[in-house]
Structure formats: C-alpha cells, structure tokens
Amino acid sequence: MLVGHGCTTQRSASDPRVALATPELTIPPLDAGTYAAPDAPGSVRFGHPVPGTGAAWDVSVRARSHSEDQESTYESDYRVEVLAVDGPAPSRVRLHFTRNVHVYQGQEKATVIDGREYVVDARAPHVRDANGNAAPEPETERVLDVFPDLGTRARIDEVLPDAAMKVGDRRDELAAAILRVIHPRAWTLGSGTALLADAGRDHARFAVTLDATSSSGLHMLLTGDANVRLRDSRLEELTLEGRYEQTTKGRTDPPGSFVLTRRITSESEARSAR
C-alpha cells in the first residue's frame, strides 16, 4: 500500500521504515528575484517575489491507491496564513486543517491533525498548537510533512530559473521538488523529468514523470501535469497517476494504481503594511 501524503498502510508514525528525521529549518540568504515579462512568444519567466504577511491560501489534496485486495484514500484540506516573513520566505505561518483523514477499505479514520490549528515557526519549537504549546511529536511530524520548507524558499521556487524558458525546455530538478510536495521524507527519487509543455499568459504547464522508491520497499512510476503560476512560481495544480508495486521480504505483490491531485483552491492576497 502506498505510503506518504497520499495513501497509507496502517503503520504508525514511529515505524522505522517510514519515520525519518524531521527536516531541518534554515533561513537562506536573500536572493529571491521578481517577475519579469517573457522575452518572446512561447517563452515564460518565473517570478520570485518576497512574500508578505497576510497572504493566505487554501490547499486540497486527494490521493487514492487501489490494488487487487485493498483500496486506500487520503484527503486533506487546509488553509495557510502567513504570519511573519524573514528575508525571502515565510518564517511563521498558521495552518488550519479542516479535514485530514485516511479512508481504508471504506472505513474513514481521522488523523491526529484533523480539525486542528497550528502555528509553524522557523524557530524551535517548530510546531505549536492553538494554545501556544509545543505540539506532540506525532502531530509535529504530520504538520511538517505538509509544510516542510518554512524559513526557506519553497523548493519549486528555488529550482525554477530567473532566465526565460521556452516550450520544450526541460527542468528536471522540478521532478525532485514535486516529489517533496508529495511527501518530504518517505520517498527517494530514482529518476524524473519535467518538460515545459505549455506557456500561457499566467501559468506554465510542465509534463512530469517520477520514478521513486520508499524505504518500505514501495516503487512507483507516475506521470502527470504540474501547473505553475508565473508571477510567483507557485504550484497551483498537480495531477499525477500511475502504478506502484510493493516488495516485502523478496516477494513482490501485485501492482496497484495511484492517482493524486493537489490544488490551491482559493487565495487572499491581503498584505499588511511593511
């Protein structure tokens, strides 16, 4: 069964096969650029503006894995609000999870962060609950899996160039950044590609392939599209689908299918005066 942001086995977060070190939170030098108009038709430039406090957006994630004998779904809806900025990146955000559940064989089970609110800070303790207390480790781990790059520019923003790109250009580093969006700890990229397939007025569409494995012996091959907003290099929509197989103690289970969608469904760009 697929492990990660998408679908999950019934393993606990403490299982050594899936529980890796919490990502280190660091603040990089100020090097973010700003949006510039394309050089020519069929080319695009990605903006890298400094974010502002008060920015907020809603994220919806749906992932489903299906094999001969089981089906599992992961559903997550949450709102992000930027509370503070340091250099080129948010340093403190509020996350409110309206829904965070697994559905296994038709039975729904809420996770420990379902319906809860947290403040995530680049400074320790990195995750606090709504009362200002350090969140328990299982909650902290899940929250940081959803928002791992606080205090740094988002990985997708980092890998997209300042120079113009043309339709047909490749930026394979984007594949690794997208795998980090799926789950920052559980997967290791074997190979991946990202080709600029479309260049519109406001968005660019990358055709993406991912070949990845997990520490638990899961292997997946996925293809799909990543739509990135030009003015701030934000991944607004991701759709991936493909196959996976599990190898346990030298035995490979029958393959299964996997589908994931991730969308930013609404946004408020209100910013406080700085």
Image: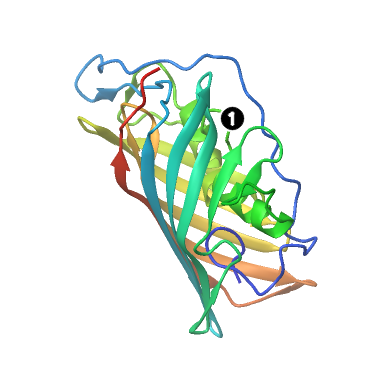
Q: Quadrant of the C terminus?
A: top left
Q: What secondary structure is marked by label 1? A: loop
Coordinates of residue 112 in the picture (x, y in percent): 61, 65
**What amino acid is labelled 1 in the image?**
Gly
Q: Which residue sits at x=56%, y=85%?
A: 69
Is residue 186 visible in this depiction of the protein?
no
Q: Is residue 157 left or right of residue 91?
A: left
Coordinates of residue 164 in the picture (x, y in percent): 34, 18
Q: Kindly indicate the quadrant of the structure image that contains residue 219.
A: bottom right
Q: Kindly indicate the quadrant of the structure image that contains residue 167.
A: top left
Q: Nearer the viewer, residue 120 or 273?
A: 273
Is residue 47 visible in this depiction of the protein?
yes
Q: Which residue sits at x=50%, y=29%?
A: 84
Q: Kindly indicate the quadrant of the structure image that contains residue 39.
A: top left
Image height of 189 relative to 2, above or below: above
Q: Is residue 122 left or right of residue 166?
A: right
Q: Is residue 41 left or right of residue 2?
A: left
Coordinates of residue 62 in the picture (x, y in percent): 42, 63
The residue where tag 1 is placed is 151
Q: Nearer the viewer, residue 77 or 40?
A: 77
